[in-house]
Image (spheres, grey):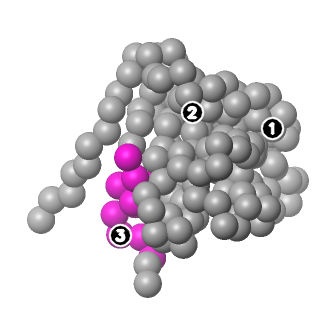
Amino acid sequence: MEFSFKYAQYSHFNLLSKNDQKLVDAAFEAMNNAYAPYSEFQVGASVLLGNGHVVLGNNQENLAYPSGLCAERVALFYAGANYPNEVIDTICIVAKGTLVSKELILAPCGSCRQVMIESSMRQSTPIRIIMVNQDNRTLVIDKVEDLLPFAFSK
């Protein structure tokens, strides 16, 4: 057996549609407010809801590791708590810091992938992902399930 999936890759996020570029800008705005004094690796996430509203999240570290929370989960949990009936259309993730080298692909951790999949299952529609690397290369994936093929599911 083999697993593969399709994605789009761009040399820079400025090659995305204007709406997607706005979502990337919002994720960078969120990233700049991250609380990351221990790792010094700031992550920002922006979530586009079906009603056009954008929800922001950023990583929140805690000295009592692992009590902190990733940017993706902050944004998704906020969306679920405050907009429970809105569909999540797209999540965008950006980061900066030396924890991950600039040439490596920036991708969500396993816990965030599972939460994204659960969010997708709750609404019964796929959630698109935009991931912007520190060198501005950008990957766009049509559905979160592609990032975790053997996720926990019903």
| Viewer-closest of 71 and 65 | 71
Q: Write down the quadrant of residue 57 in the picture.
A: top right
64 is higher (above) or lower (below) than 123 = above
Q: Which residue is mark 1?
A: 34
Q: Is residue 2 left or right of residue 78?
A: left
Q: Mark 3 or mark 2: name the one nearer the start of the chain.
A: 2
Q: CA distance from mark 3 to mark 2?
A: 25 Å
The picture places residue 68, in percent across and down from the top left corner, at: 79, 56
Question: Which disc is residue 100 wearing?
Answer: 2
93 is higher (above) or lower (below) than 108 = above
- Label 3 amino acid? Phe
Report the residue at 59% width, 51% height from top: 50
**Residue furthest left as drawn:** 1
Graded by Cα atoms within 10 Å as few (under 14), some (14 to 19) or many (20 or more), the crowding at tag 3 reads few
Helix, strand or loop at mark 1: loop
Q: Which residue is mark 3?
A: 150
Graded by Cα atoms within 10 Å as few (under 14), some (14 to 19) or many (20 or more), the crowding at tag 1 reads many
- Label 2 amino acid? Val
Could you tell me if residue 65 is visible in this image? no
Q: CA distance from mark 3 to mark 1?
A: 30 Å
**Residue furthest front as drawn:** 51
Quadrant of the frame with the C terminus: bottom left
* In this rendering, the label closer to the viewer, 3 or 2: 3
21 is higher (above) or lower (below) than 14 = below
Report the residue at 70% width, 67% height from top: 84
| Viewer-closest of 35 and 94 | 94
Report the residue at 35% width, 69% height from top: 150
Q: Mark 3 or mark 1: name the one nearer the start of the chain.
A: 1
